[in-house]
């Protein structure tokens, strides 16, 4: 799967879940929930983030969100996370450290980790998040057609 699949996936401030960007309007966007396919529109006050543009602070450089999703995917062998996004911040940080030892603990907050875990699980649930490269999934690709 192309890393560009996140180019149309957005988060909207004040709204739970993730959305597929359908079109832009003069004052916002029209989007569709990737969970229930319900359409919604935004206004210029709401903050919109394209997932493809989100970067996670590392100690030396910033990493695209897709790279973090790949690390989680590999760590979880292609399954949902073992930790719940509503877990205690200490557990979220410990889990994230297992995935990404080089993250900047001073600039990546538990609230960021919570969103990343929630987004990863949503994308996996709806079948959007798939990685074909065997180096990402280990040798779990035996039954691929």
Image (cartoon, helix red, strand yellow):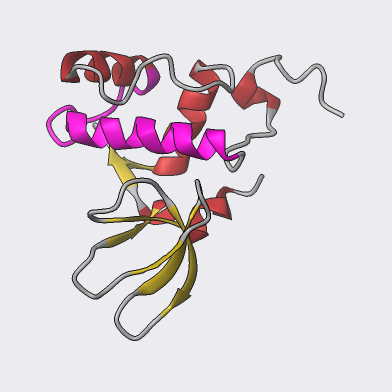
Q: Foreground: 108 or 40?
A: 40
Compared with 32, 129 (above or below) is above
- The picture places residue 97, in percent across and down from the top left corner, at 30, 18
- The picture places residue 47, in percent across and down from the top left corner, at 24, 63
- Residue 5 placement, left or right of 122: right
- Residue 111 part of the magenta segment: yes
Main SS of the magenta segment? helix
- The picture places residue 136, in percent across and down from the top left corner, at 60, 25
Q: Quadrant of the C terminus?
A: top right
- Residue 134 placement, left or right of 128: right
- The picture places residue 10, in percent across and down from the top left corner, at 40, 56
Which residue ends up furthest to the bottom in the rendered image?
26
Compared with 119, 46 (above or below) is below
Q: Is residue 58 visible?
A: no
Magenta-drawn segment: 99-126
Task: Please report the residue visible at 34 percent of the width from the left and 20 percent of the height from the top.
Answer: 84
Question: Which quadrant of the view contains residue 62?
Answer: top left
Task: Please report the residue visible at 45 percent of the width from the left and 65 percent of the height from the top.
Answer: 31
Q: Foreground: 130 or 3?
A: 130
Compared with 131, 35 (above or below) is below
Which residue ends up furthest to the left in the rendered image?
106
Task: Please report the residue visible at 37 percent of the width from the left and 33 percent of the height from the top.
Answer: 118
- Residue 59 placement, left or right of 116: left
- Residue 119 part of the magenta segment: yes
Q: Is residue 23 visible?
A: yes
- Residue 134 placement, left or right of 48: right
Q: Quadrant of the N terminus?
A: top right
Task: Please report the residue visible at 45 percent of the width from the left and 34 percent of the height from the top.
Answer: 120
């Amino acid at each position: 799967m192309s890393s560009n699949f996140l180019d149309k996936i957005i988060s909207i401030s004040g709204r739970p879940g993730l959305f597929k960007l359908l079109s832009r309007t003069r004052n916002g966007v029209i989007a569709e929930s990737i969970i229930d396919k319900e359409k919604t529109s935004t206004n210029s006050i709401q903050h919109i983030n394209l997932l493809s543009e989100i970067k996670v602070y590392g100690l030396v450089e910033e990493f695209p969100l897709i790279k973090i999703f790949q690390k989680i995917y590999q760590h979880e062998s292609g399954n949902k996370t073992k930790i719940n996004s509503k877990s205690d911040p200490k557990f979220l940080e410990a889990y994230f450290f297992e995935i990404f030892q080089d993250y900047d603990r001073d600039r990546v907050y538990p609230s960021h980790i919570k969103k990343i875990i929630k987004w990863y699980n949503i994308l996996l649930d709806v079948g959007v998040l798939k990685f074909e490269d065997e180096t990402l999934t280990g040798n779990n690709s035996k039954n691929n057609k």
